[in-house]
Amino acid sequence: MTTHWTLGCDAADPHKVAAFWATALGYVAEPGYDDPDGASIIDPDGVRPAIGFLRVPEGKTAKNRMHIDIRVAGEPPWDMAEREQLIRAKATELVVAGATAVREEFYGEHLGHIVMLDPEGNEFCVA
């Protein structure tokens, strides 16, 4: 049996970052979680782990040691042209939602993933 768990994250503005990640992952605000210094988002299907965001006084000072990779292209084998379109479409959607695109990484001649920053500067990848 697996253990249920929640990913806990520090934030300067937990509600803003939670709203971004809810959009990015297709999550929703956790019903009944009402805290001005925290926010929680959940998988609406109840399958994936919850993610909590708590306000902390200090800002981000270095590269985060753990991050979320958003895998929009599914599992191999891939149609590489279709995979690239899915990655670029999701990255564009996330820029509109407040992310910043940092760089593109290629696997040979094919787009592998796009490195991005969430609204508070936390690194993540879209693959």
Image (cartoon, rainbow, N blue to C red):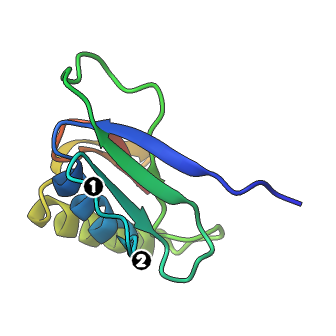
What percent of the width, then of the height, locates residue 77? 65, 70
Q: Tell me the mark number nearer the camera, choosing from 1 and 2.
A: 1
Q: CA distance from mark 1 to mark 2?
A: 41 Å
First reached walking from the N terminus: tag 1 or tag 2: 1
**What residue type is disc 1 on?**
Asp
What percent of the width, then of the height, locates residue 86? 36, 73
| Mark 1 surroundings within 10 Å by alpha-carbon count, few (fewer than 14), some (14 through 19), many (20 or more) | few
Q: Mark number for residue 1? A: none
Q: Mark number for residue 82? A: 2
- Seen as rendered, the residue at the extreme top is 61
Name the secondary structure under disc 1: loop
- Seen as rendered, the residue at the extreme right is 1
Query: Which quadrant holds the C terminus?
Result: bottom left
What percent of the width, then of the height, locates residue 41? 39, 64
Above or below for 95 versus 72: above
Using the rendered view, name the quadrant where residue 3 is placed: bottom right
Query: Which quadrant holds the N terminus?
Result: bottom right
Identify the residue under disc 1. 35
Above or below for 37 versus 34: above
Q: Is residue 2 left or right of residue 127?
A: right
Above or below for 127 versus 61: below
The answer to whether residue 112 of the structure is visible from this angle is no
What percent of the width, then of the height, locates residue 53? 34, 47
